[in-house]
Each structure stands twice: as structure tokens, then as C-alpha cells.
Image: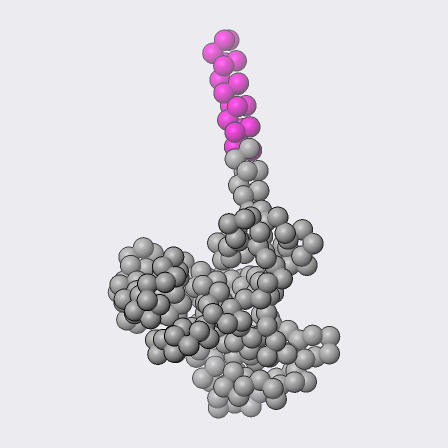
Amino acid sequence: MKQNKIHKISIIALVFCLLFTTVASAATVSFSDISKSWAKDYIIKAAELGLVKGYTDGTFGPTKNVTRFDTMLMLSRLHKIDTDLEKQIENKYVPLIKEVTAGKDEGAYTELSKALSLGLLSEDKFRSLYTSGSLKKEASREDVAVFIVKAMCLQKEVEELENKLYTLPFNDSSQILSDYRPYVYLAYEKGIISGDDKKNFNPKNSITRQELAKMVCGAYDYIKENDVKPVFDDFET
């Protein structure tokens, strides 16, 4: 009888422990400045998935504008790859990154390596943008559309659009760089971007961290639902 009582107490204690662990896990992501953000749920989801990160002071900075550099880091996290492949990618790209950055941004080497392996930028483009300082400048909406479509592994669809007629659904489509238009079209078609209430895309406008969090969540959902797997031809997988 005494043993049964002890056994029941142990089970109850275990249940409470599991419940507490679940609650604690759900409350892990917390930023002090997103309570009034329209993108709060997207920010939390993206953070829980490890797609976005906050600052050391516990804030997220939802209304801060993102740079091209920030965008590359966020999008590099969309695909989870195994340790062996990640090591191969780092072995290829880290020497280049060290050279270009002159040893700066060391904490971003892994994510930059993944971004380059996904084709977000060519090696030459990375070199030119970083050394000129352009990579650390604010990203435009059309910049982000290009990066996201590449991260979603839709380059083949981009190439197919070059031989097709398609219409961008924005009143200011003529303001979008011609080379960027198929990327913007696909980002719209896949539900990642949209226009404003005047049906403008505003391609040259900057983009905030909360806006990018929503886009990253959309890209993640597309990748998961369509079982998108990046192809790494230069590496053993």
C-alpha cells in the first residue's frame, strides 16, 4: 500500500515536471519591445524556429530597417543541414570570407557560408558589396525579394520566366529593376510579398525587421509544405 502511494506521488510529480518544462519551453522566446507590433506572432514564430535573433538587451527592434547583410544571415537559417555538410561548406567559403572581411564579423562566418552556398550572392558579388560597404547598407524591398526567392531554391522558375510573358500586379512595376522583376513576381506568386493599399510594391523602399520576419515565416512554410531541399552540387551529401 505504501509503495503504491509512493508510486502515485512519483507519477504526479513527473506530470507536473513535464507540464512545467512544456510551459517553460513555450515561453523561451521573449522580446521586450514587440507587444505592440502587428507582426508579433510572426516574430515569435520565426524566433522559435531559429530564423531570427534579438539583441543582447532583450529587444528585437521590430521597426529597425534591415541591411542586405542581415537579410542574408536570416535567410541562411531557412535550411537545416547536417554537420558534415555544414563543415564542407565552411571549409570552402570561410577562407574567402576571412579574406574579404579582414577577419571581421567572425560570428557570422557559418551563416555567410551557407548563404553563399545557397547562391544568395556569387563570390565576386559578395566581395564587391562587402568591400564597398554596400552589403551593410539598408536592403530595399526588391533586394529582399531576390534574396528570398534564391533562398527558396526557385532559381529554375526564375529562368523559366525569362521565356514567358507575365504581368506584375503592381502599379509601380516599371520602377523595379528589370533583372529583379521575375524574382518579385515569384515572391508575390508564392505569397511572400504583397503591395500596399494603392497596389504599389515600392521596390526602392527599405524594409523593417518585423516585415522581414513575416516574409521569412512565409518562406519557411513554403519550403516545409513543398519539401524543398537545396542542391549542393559541389559537396558530398
Answer whether residue 3 is magenta in the image. Answer: yes
Answer whether residue 94 is magenta in the image. Answer: no
Tell me where residue 67 appears, x and y as whole percent: 51, 68
Extreme residue toward the right, this view:
197
Q: Is residue 226 visible?
A: no
Q: Which residues are magenta?
A: 1-19
Tell me where residue 87 appears, x and y as whole percent: 29, 59
**Of 191 and 57, which appears nearest the observer?**
57
- For the C terminus, give its image quadrant: bottom left
Q: Give the residue drawn at x 61%, y 59%.
A: 62
**Of 134 and 45, which appears nearest the observer?**
134
Magenta-highlighted stretch: main secondary structure? helix
Q: Give the residue drawn at x 48%, y 91%.
A: 163
Tell me where residue 16 appears, x and y as whole percent: 55, 28
Q: Quadrant of residue 108?
A: bottom left
Q: Is residue 14 visible?
A: yes
**Of 8 and 33, which appears nearest the observer?**
33
Extreme residue toward the top, this view:
1
Image height check: is 79 above or below 158?
Answer: above
Q: Give the residue drawn at x 39%, y 61%.
A: 105
How was the colour assigned to the protein in this rendering?
one colour
Q: Quadrant of residue 99?
A: bottom left
Q: Give the residue drawn at x 54%, y 43%.
A: 28
Total tally of numbered discs in the picture? 0
